Amino acid sequence: MIHARGLTRVFTMKKEAVEAVRGIDLDVEAGQLVAFLGPNGAGKSTTLRMLTTLLPPTSGTATVAGHDVARDPAAVRSRIGYVGQRNSAGEEFHVRDELVTQGRCYGLRRKEAAARADELLDLLDLAPLAGRVPGTLSGGQRRRLDIALGLIHRPDLLFLDEPSTGLDPKSRAEIWEHILRLRATYGTTLFLTTHYLEEADNMAERVVIIDGGRIIADGTAEQLKNDLAGDHIVITTATEREAARAAEIGGGSADGVTVRLRVAGATATLPDYLRGLDAAGIKVKTAETIRPTLDDVFLTLTGRSLTDDDIPA
Amino acid sequence: MTTFLRDTATVFTREFRPSLRNPAGLLFEMGQPLLFLFLFGSLLDGAVGSSWQWFVPGILVMMCLTGPMSAGYTLLVELIGGAMERLLVTPLNRTAMLVGKSAKAMLTLLVQAVLIIALAIPLGFELHAAGVVAGLAQLVLFGVGLGAFSFVLAIKSAPGGTLFYIVSQSIVFPLLLLSGVLLPLESAPGWLRAAGQLNPITYIVDAQRALFAGDLTSPSVLYGTAAACAVAAAGLYLGNRALRQGV
């Protein structure tokens, strides 16, 4: 569905060339749900804008939905849907009018566009708001309208740029419900950016991490966490001497009375470990298993936390 | 071509529907120049004898400048929001997008023109129908080009928008003064007349006055039409390029 090779975008800012995206290779098969993860300024949106024909690449190629973004942007456009970071509906326009216009933009006949608009109003629980202007809708309702606008022509591939950012937890859950239902019903390929780590972790079957304009990791959330961060067991003992011995037995490291070890399958390993310590006469005061998060993955890869918004230039 | 026409109609319909839903605003907008005509025209009437023939095409050119500028403003608003981006991801023809967005301003202009002419006739305006039709066609072409320029300006000033306000506020009045639309340039000093010669609006104004006087074969008609075509072609070219380069 997406095949990008060496995709690069250079911006000129104050006569200085800034490489926002540096040679991305990416293949996404039909039906996948891919989360594109990275800190602010990593190149997520720029990549998305190139894949959706909004921005011509400086170099490299991308084939999206079977067509080259640079050579045949119109063919790409008619096959993809896009839900941008900002609100898609114009402020002056009624909700239903905008949906009909959107259908007309994709070449639907007036009747088809109207029927499809009504269908989407129902699908996304927007029917009672059909005659309102976007300014009177709540954040979650506006977001649902954005998604409806992106779906009017039943695209096989939908791009979503931070679909749940800025929403309250309930609205976020609703948006996800709609996204997942869409996928289950129509098998739509979904490519979305997010900076909510737990969303990428729970929802996506594939996580692509971008940093400094380059893809630095690509796999299932499970794979990435196991390969790059791993499970940890953390125990505390009564004395530092005991901690040192416990670290030795488990093959981990001690810091004061705290012992930390990286293991495969922490919940299964912990009881054995504790029995071993017991046999060695070490009194364990607390014990916990820690499952890695995608943030740990990012930390391993870059030495920074994804949740820090300050990125060194 | 059919795609182009369909897409132009789509964009125009989108822009025009809110006005239909709020006809009071539309009536006010379309009726506004009448006030202008009566206040300013009456002043002028006393000063320059049979001024209506000279003044009506001038007002139309002036209105032809303000409509596209406000169209540019609406584009800027949609650029700052996400609506423009959303439309740009659709296969909508880019030129149709530019033309369709100007079309509402042009329709408003045509209605205003009909109103003004109808009211000016009893005041002494002499109607040359063929000339008026040709003149309005020329103005629409010119207005579509101006609209495209205004969109380019909006695209270049996004996301802040400051550039748009500065340029659109500061450019219109000097261009008008330099075109002889308000006061004749014949009595101006040489340097001012030379500057006027570089202003495409000068040729449009001259052509409009010739056409409204029924003088269809005047060379100024040719120059004016050439200026309108040049502005439209350059505006649409630059507009397409700006959209292609990414917004």
Image (cartoon, coloured by chain):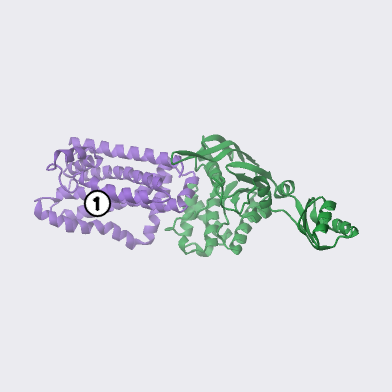
Chain colours: A green, B purple
Residue A66 to residue A136: above or below: above
- Residue sitting nearer the eye, A286 or B235: A286
User: Which x, y percent locates residue A298?
Assistant: 65, 48
Label count reads 1
Is B34 displayed left or right of A41 in the figure?
A: left
User: Which x, y percent locates residue B16?
Assistant: 38, 54
- Residue sitting nearer the eye, A62 or B94: A62
Q: Amino acid at mark 1?
A: Ala
Outermost residue, front side: A241
Is B95 displayed left or right of B57 in the figure?
A: right
Asked whether residue A68 appears in the rendered view, the answer is: no
Which quadrant does the C terminus of chain B fall into? top left
Splitting the image into 4 quarters, where does residue B211 fall? top left
Q: Residue at x 51, y 41 (%)?
A: A53
- Residue sitting nearer the eye, A29 or A47: A47
Quickly name the residue at label 1. B113
User: Which x, y percent locates residue B245?
Assistant: 45, 40
Tag 1's secondary structure? helix
User: Which x, y percent locates residue B111?
Assistant: 28, 53
Q: Which subunit holds the residue at mark 1? A: B
Which quadrant does the N terminus of chain B fall into? top left
Asked whether residue B73 appears in the rendered view, the answer is: yes
Q: Residue at x 45, y 55 (%)?
A: A90
Is A311 displayed left or right of B221 in the figure?
A: right
Residue A130 to residue B198: above or below: below
Residue B247 to residue A276: above or below: above
